[in-house]
Amino acid sequence: MTRTEIENAVREAVEKNTAAAKRMSETEKKKMTPAQQKIRRRQQNALIRNLIQLFFFLMMPGAFVAGFSGVKSIFQKVAAGSVLEMDSFVKALIGLCIFTIVFGRFFCGFACAFGTFDDFVYWISGLIQKKLLRRKKQYSLPERLSPWLQKVKFLILALIVASCALGIYDRFNQYNWNPWSVFSFITALRFELGGYLIGIVILILIIAGMAVKERFFCQFLCPMGAVFAIIPQFPFAWLQRDAENCLKNCRACQMKCPVDIKLEPDGFRNGECIGCEKCAGVCPKANLTRWDRRLLKNEILPVLIRAAILFLLGAYLGLCRFL
Ligand code: SF4
Ligand code: SF4
Ligand code: SF4
């Protein structure tokens, strides 16, 4: 056989196999009931999100600490009356804020290491409650407390900003109380935590909170989350809900929301939305969409594109660990 004949034979075999695989997946899809298709769609969305979270946890674990250091840096410079330098922290803050203005809080929902850790602790807690404590439903703090507790993070942000502006932040910081520094040491596999007793204790208390409320730290305590909740976002960053197309009495999206957001008839216009897209994943009518989902007629591709843009931004800002 000549080389061309072999190449043609291989090409024909590949084409045949691809067509057969396509036919098979279409037949499989046809065989699945609508309920099964919904479950598969939900599982696919959750898997993609978990993989992206794992990727960013490994590649950019210090991004939110860098962004928050930018906030402190700005206010410390302002208090000292010195010229504002565009150091790496300020650049990280500006980069993450611009990304959030354009794409919503995708960083919080998919890429922040502390948010991912929050999700992991809540998941482990659910597993323990189910398997060891034989609870049918995972315990969670009552939903009615959320709107009140969510205000605490703004207070924490105000206290930190005020102490930076008054020039006393460093005096408090000498006690190494800051739990996110402890967390970033651990994710960087640096375990010299001798002087961080207060920070370790606070981190343990936060972990206890994470076990009883999904996104406990993000919702109630994170000063960077407070910054993201305050800054404006382009309307096209939000998921839109076509309320008229909803199933009667359906609350699936609201019940799945980790930060207990109340639905608006036509979308989620709420700074508290962490952009996790869990609501869209559970909607039985695929009724939560955004322009990019509609344009690409795909739920996963827009998420991958956002993740790629964020990763390139992180690499440019020097936030990626191995680059
Ligand atoms: S709220 Fe804070 S900790 Fe939570 S995901 Fe956003 S930046 Fe990270
Ligand atoms: S509204 Fe949807 S995207 Fe926003 S936090 Fe809730 S579940 Fe996540
Ligand atoms: S889950 Fe879907 S159908 Fe149900 S209320 Fe939410 S958007 Fe409407």
Image (spheres, helix red, strand yellow):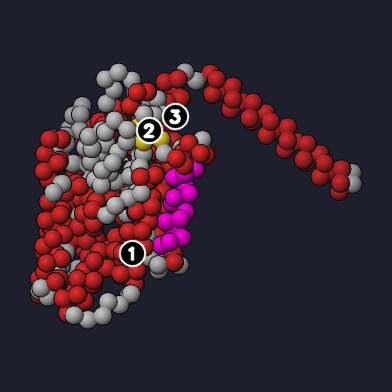
Q: Residues within 10 Å of mark 3 (few under 14, many from 20)?
A: few
Reply yes or no: does residue 161 show up in magenta.
no
Q: Nearer the viewer, mark 3 or mark 2?
A: 2
Give the residue displayed 72% in from the left and 38% down from the top.
Answer: 14
What's the residue at 32%, 33% (across, down)?
Answer: 266
Is residue 72 among the parts visible in the rendering? yes
Residue 262 in the image: state x and y as whole percent: 22, 34
Number of labels in the image equals 3
- Residue for badge 2: 288
Residue 61, position as x, y percentages in the image: 33, 60
Secondary structure at badge 1 equals helix
**Quadrant for ligand 2?**
top left
Q: Which residue reaches farthest right?
A: 2
Q: Which residues are magenta?
A: 300-314
What's the distance in space between the residues labelled 3 and 2, CA to CA?
17 Å
Residue at disc 2, CB closer than 8 Å to ligand 3: yes
Give the CA distance from mark 1 to mark 2: 29 Å
Residue carrying label 3 = 40
Numbered label attached to residue 94: 1
Q: Which quarter of the figure is the N terminus placed in?
A: top right
Residue behind label 1 places its C-beta within 8 angstroms of ligand 1: no
